[in-house]
């Protein structure tokens, strides 16, 4: 095993467990609040209803890898670098994670528009709320642990939703 290999596996495991729990919580909250954001005109499935093998693969591979490299390693790092010029480390990390998380969430809106859904206030609140919260979680994992932790947590979130969908 290479030097530091043990810590990489530890960070991957930590991220995966955190992501699994976050996925289950997000899916349960989505089910709970679905009556508020669902529209009778265009059926938008809840997280549990939309989960299958293909969405799982896309979520794990694209979300867990590509989005984490772009949003955390790229965007969050750039924001944090700028904020560290004017703020102490802890508030800079939090603010960078929040800004990157919000931009991450906003990046999910075009897919909903492309599905033909009308962007109602409750639906936009759902998309921005869940994705910002998860984006901040991944951002803090990235800043405090590693990109491995953030990627594993993002992938784990999709796995957690998928596992819950099997028994729901």
Image: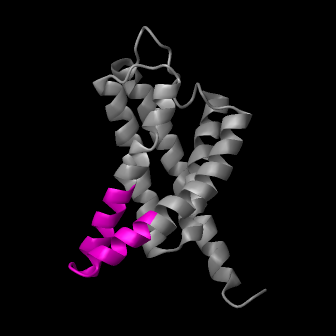
> Which residues fall within the magenta stretch?
75-100
Residue 165 coordinates in the image, percent (x, y): 62, 31
Residue 82 coordinates in the image, percent (x, y): 31, 75
Residue 14 coordinates in the image, percent (x, y): 57, 66
* Residue ID at (36%, 62%): 97
The C terminus sits in image quarter = top right
The kind of secondary structure the magenta stretch mainly shows is helix
The N terminus sits in image quarter = bottom right
Can you tell which quarter of the image residue 16 is in? bottom right
Q: Is residue 128 magenta?
A: no
- Residue lying at the far top of the rendered structure: 41
* Residue ID at (60%, 36%): 164
Image: 68 above or below 61: below
Describe the colour scheme in one phrase: one colour
Q: Nearer the viewer, residue 72 or 49?
A: 72
Residue 29 coordinates in the image, percent (x, y): 41, 34
Is 111 on the left or on the right of 129, as rendered?
Answer: right
Q: Is residue 17 visible?
A: no
Q: Is residue 90 magenta?
A: yes
- Residue lying at the far bottom of the rendered structure: 3
* Residue ID at (45%, 20%): 117
Image: 128 above or below 37: below
């Amino acid at each position: 095993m290479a030097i530091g290999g043990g810590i990489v596996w530890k960070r991957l495991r930590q991220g995966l467990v955190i992501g699994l729990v976050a996925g289950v919580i997000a899916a349960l909250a989505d089910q709970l609040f679905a009556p508020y954001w669902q529209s009778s005109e265009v059926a938008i499935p809840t997280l549990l209803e939309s989960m299958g093998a293909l969405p799982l693969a896309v979520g794990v591979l694209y979300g867990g890898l590509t989005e984490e490299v772009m949003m955390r390693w790229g965007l969050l790092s750039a924001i944090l670098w700028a904020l560290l010029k004017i703020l102490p480390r802890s508030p800079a990390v939090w603010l960078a994670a929040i800004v990157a998380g919000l931009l991450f969430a906003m990046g999910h809106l075009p897919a909903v528009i492309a599905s033909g859904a009308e962007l109602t206030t409750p639906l936009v609140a759902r998309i921005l709320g869940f994705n910002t919260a998860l984006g901040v979680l991944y951002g803090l994992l990235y800043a405090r642990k590693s990109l491995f932790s953030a990627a594993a947590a993002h992938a784990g979130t999709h796995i957690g939703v998928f596992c819950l969908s099997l028994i729901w």
